[in-house]
Image (cartoon, rainbow, N blue to C red):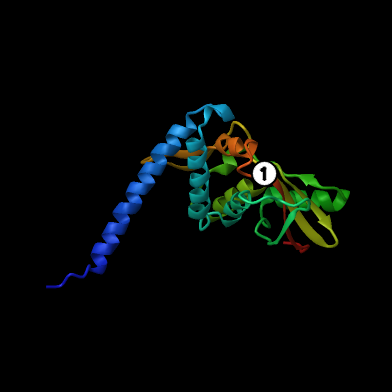
Amino acid sequence: MDWGISLKTKLISSIIVLFLISSFCLYRLDHLNSIPTTPSNFSWINKAEIYVLGLAIGVIGYPIYPEVAREHLMMYRPFSNKPKVIESDFFRGSPVVEKGIIKAKRSGKPYRLAWPSSAYKLSFQPSEYKEAGIVLALNAGYVRIQDNKIIAGINIKYPQDSFATLISTKGLGTIGVEEGLFWVLQKVGWLYSGEVEWVTDFKQT
């Protein structure tokens, strides 16, 4: 008698387990989203749930928006007094950033980056998809020119009250996370905030 388990059976079992885990995580996230974001409203277990859900969001979101996920996961370790510097030009090509680069070059001063909330929408259209990732990583940050380098910086921290849409579709509705949940962890010292600078050579696009 063959007691082995076929690859098909393993695959189906894995999909079912992942579906059940994902469903439970979404259920818990929906519950946590509904709690007013004041530290005293969250038990130690609630905070542990948020901590683990944050790790899961960072890992799952990495293939979709790697820079955003990287910034989020950085918050799980303390920052030094100096900004964390990452060599990357992922932000080039954004109309908002390119305008900021021109302004910063002319003035010799950092230029504040800001986008409307509509720019956060996840889209399968390539230019909108890229722009959404840049927005999530750099909104409220700045860009400056220094030593023939373009530096896009951001103080990564979460606000107390801001709902971030992760997925919005007709079939599933809106799936998102209340960023204030991570603000609570910042307040109790479970997550850390600090400066991150994305740096690339100054080149005209």
Measured along the vertical axis of the image, is residue 39 above or below residue 125? above
Q: Is residue 125 visible?
A: no
- Quadrant of the snapshot with the C terminus: bottom right
Closer-to-camera residue (174/104): 174
> Is residue 26 toward the left or the right of residue 4 in the image?
right
Which residue does the image show at 41% across and 43% down from the upper left? 25
Q: Amino acid at mark 1?
A: Asn
Residue 58 appears at what percent x and percent y? 53, 51
Residue 49 appears at what percent x and percent y? 48, 41
- Quadrant of the snapshot with the N terminus: bottom left
Which residue does the image show at 49% across and 46% down from the upper left? 52
Q: Is residue 107 visible?
A: yes
Closer-to-camera residue (94/65): 65
Closer-to-camera residue (86/137): 86
Q: Residue furthest bottom?
A: 1
Q: Residue furthest left?
A: 1
Q: How many marks?
A: 1
Mark 1 Cα-neighbour bin, 10 Å: few <14, some 14–19, many ≥20 = many
> Is residue 56 toward the left or the right of residue 157 in the image?
left
Q: Where on the picture, by quarter, is residue 187?
A: top right
Q: Which residue is mark 1?
A: 139
Measured along the vertical axis of the image, is residue 21 above or below residue 13? above
Which residue does the image show at 76% across and 55% down from the upper left? 151
Residue 10 appears at what percent x and percent y? 27, 63
Which residue does the image show at 70% across and 41% down from the upper left? 140
